[in-house]
DNA sequence: GCCAACGTTGGC
DNA sequence: GCCAACGTTGGC
């Protein structure tokens, strides 16, 4: 019987279905820690809109990693590694996802820079400043990558 | 169901 | 440290 060639193992992440922005205070969990961990559970979200955004994330979706309070800048790109499940730190109805780092930005994109670009004026980051997990449009995501002088690694 | 009081986020 | 924005709680 002829051997059939096995299909190559799929190692690449699926194409993102959507883009997001997640906030973290660098004093609590900085980008450098995600790089060190290589994977983390995004827990502690206690806001319904943010939770619903977590639940809408698909495997392979990309998220801008924003440092709030200190820095106030986007510093990296993360990828959804595991879609939502019950937040194990509570018995209440909250969710988490697992993320992994994709790439650090060559140039950080500050809140100030975002405010200065009219194409980014509608970003949820600006419109809903207290939302810790928010959506990002493709055009916004691309604009941010451009400002960051960063290209995504080949998938 | 309204809304005042309160707590939290996060920029400045 | 201040405070605006805004989500949540609880009395009525």
Image: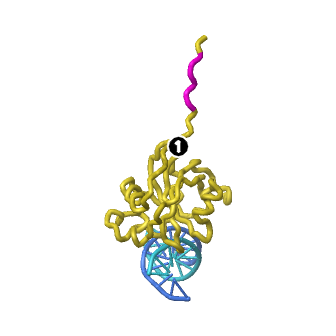
Chain colours: A yellow, B cyan, C blue
Vertical comparison of A81 with A34: above or below: above
Is residue A142 something that shows in the picture? yes
- Image quarter in which the N terminus of chain A is found: top right
Give the residue displayed 51% in from the left and 46% down from the top. Answer: A60
Provide residue A138's location: percent of width, then percent of height. 39, 53
| Span colored in magenta | A3-8
Q: Secondary structure at mark 1?
A: loop
Q: Residues within 10 Å of mark 1 (few under 14, many from 20)?
A: few
Determine which quarter of the picture holds residue A70.
bottom right
Asked if residue A54 can be seen in this view, the reply is no
Task: Give percent across and percent down for residue A38.
Answer: 62, 54
Q: Residue furthest top?
A: A1
Residue beneath the point at 63% across and 56% down = A40
Q: Which residue is mark 1?
A: A13
Instruction: Work out whether B8 lies above or below A92.
Output: below
- Given residues A63 and A128, the one toward you in this image is A63
Identify the subunit bearing mark 1.
Answer: A
Look at the image and say whether residue A6 sits in the magenta stretch: yes
Q: Is residue A31 magenta?
A: no
The x, y position of residue A43, in whole percent, is 61, 59
Which residue is found at the position 44% from the left and 69% from the top? Answer: A110
The image quarter in which residue A137 lies: bottom left
Is A128 situated left or right of A10 in this image? left
């Amino acid at each position: 019987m002829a051997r059939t060639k096995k299909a190559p193992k799929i190692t690449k992440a699926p194409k993102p279905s959507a883009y997001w922005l997640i906030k973290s205070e660098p004093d609590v969990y900085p980008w450098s820690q995600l790089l060190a961990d290589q994977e983390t559970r995004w827990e502690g979200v206690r806001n319904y809109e943010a939770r619903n955004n977590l639940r809408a994330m698909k495997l392979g979706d990309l998220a801008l990693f924003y440092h709030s309070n200190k820095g106030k800048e986007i510093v990296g790109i993360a990828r959804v590694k595991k879609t939502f499940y019950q937040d194990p730190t509570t018995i209440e109805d909250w969710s988490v996802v697992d993320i992994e780092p994709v790439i650090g930005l060559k140039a950080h994109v500050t809140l100030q820079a975002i405010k200065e670009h009219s194409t980014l004026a509608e970003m949820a980051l600006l419109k809903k400043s207290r939302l810790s997990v928010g959506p990002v449009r493709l055009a916004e995501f691309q604009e941010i990558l451009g400002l960051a002088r960063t290209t995504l690694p080949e998938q």
